[in-house]
Amino acid sequence: MDVGFTNPIPKKIKYGLVFFCGLLCIGCGREGVVTIKQVDYEHAKAVGVTFDTAMDVEQLRVFVGAESQTSVIGVIVSEGHQHRFTPVVPFTSGQTYTLRQQDTVVLASFSIPEVQGIPPAEVLAIYPQVDTVPENLLKVYLEFNRPMQRLENALDHISVTDATDGTVVQPFLRLESELWNAEGTLLTLWLDPGRIKTDLIPNRELGLPLESGKRYRLEIDSGWKSQDGMALQQRYSKTWVVGQRDDQRPALRNWTLEWKEATGKAPLTIDFGEPMDAFLGVETLRFFDDVGRVNGKLEFVGQQQQQLRFTPEREWQGPEIKIQVENRLEDLSGNNLARLFDRPIAEGAEAEPDTSKTQTLRIRRKE
């Protein structure tokens, strides 16, 4: 009987299959493995992470922390099994990040060390800086000392409370594309225009974002971080009392010009007679003398955003100064020199006033 004998050729085939399956299993295991190689830096900022994996990187996402659902926006560049993830905004110092498969399974993590010796991020100013604002206030500005992160919506770090009764309110328009300046240091927040314009449905159903006679407190939380990962480290706040509605356009006839000395580099002060938009006030005025354009420094003086002082870089020439003002200059309610912000719909259907045009003021030196 040959029952006890084993054919040697099938045995080799059997061992070969076992070896192949073993390799396959090892390969499958490696496909689910992510190995962090290094965090990449440029100018002391963590600008990328390099990792190895055999798996399809289309299944990978980078998240803030181990449990949050905040994913990091960026791109992955691959070369073989080595990959580099570059975030749109540099990684935050002191923060841990995770690489996850299908947004849920954590495959690897890495941390960015705290950066030492860098001063904390600060809020330089909250505008309007006035104590009383009109009922139809249109914009609020936040100015920072360094570029801020934009991983989340800015409104997630900002709260507004009706200080009269303690309720939290939502006066601002939530935008997908937030209104930052190019440097990332100035954020413009619009109070909901649909609630400010009296002919629109949001105004009829919800009313104005702010109510006359009440006090409102804006707070910025301390967890908001700059692009280099430095947190604000303290809460910032600003309280406004809400006054009456402003339905009047700014008018040059109401402005007062003060030029104490008509020689040298004497500053010139404009009193608008009412608070004006802090940044349009600086952007929309130009100064000229007998020689031509005069450059210099423009800044609001005092706390009411009503007086603007211009200090020239060179000496004034000639007996007269001309001031060109663009029509787009606005007060706190968005009324500019050409039109009211909240004007009847029928009027709005007509041709839009040209806000790029300028008006001219003149002042002569005293003999």
Image (cartoon, rainbow, N blue to C red):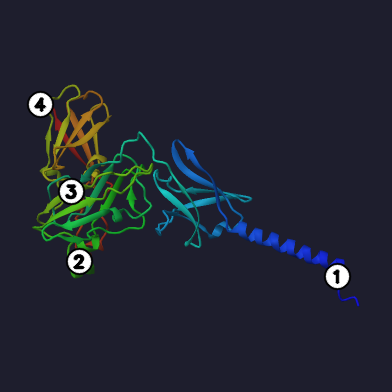
> Total marks drawn?
4
Q: Which residue is mark 3?
A: 238
Q: Is residue 282 above or below residue 248?
A: above
CA gap, disc 1 to disc 2?
A: 90 Å
Q: Is residue 331 visible?
A: no
Question: Within 10 Å of the Cα at label 2, are there few (<14), some (14-19), or many (20+) other Cα atoms?
Answer: some
Mark 1 or 2: the one toward you:
1
Give the residue displayed 14% in from the left and 25% down from the top: 262
Name the foreground residue: 41 vs 175. 41
Q: Which residue is mark 1?
A: 6
226 sits left or right of 111 in the view: left
- Say what secondary structure mark 3 lies in: strand
N-term-proximal mark, 4 vs 3: 3
Residue type beneath disc 3: Lys
Q: Which residue is mark 2?
A: 203
| Residue 366 - label | 4
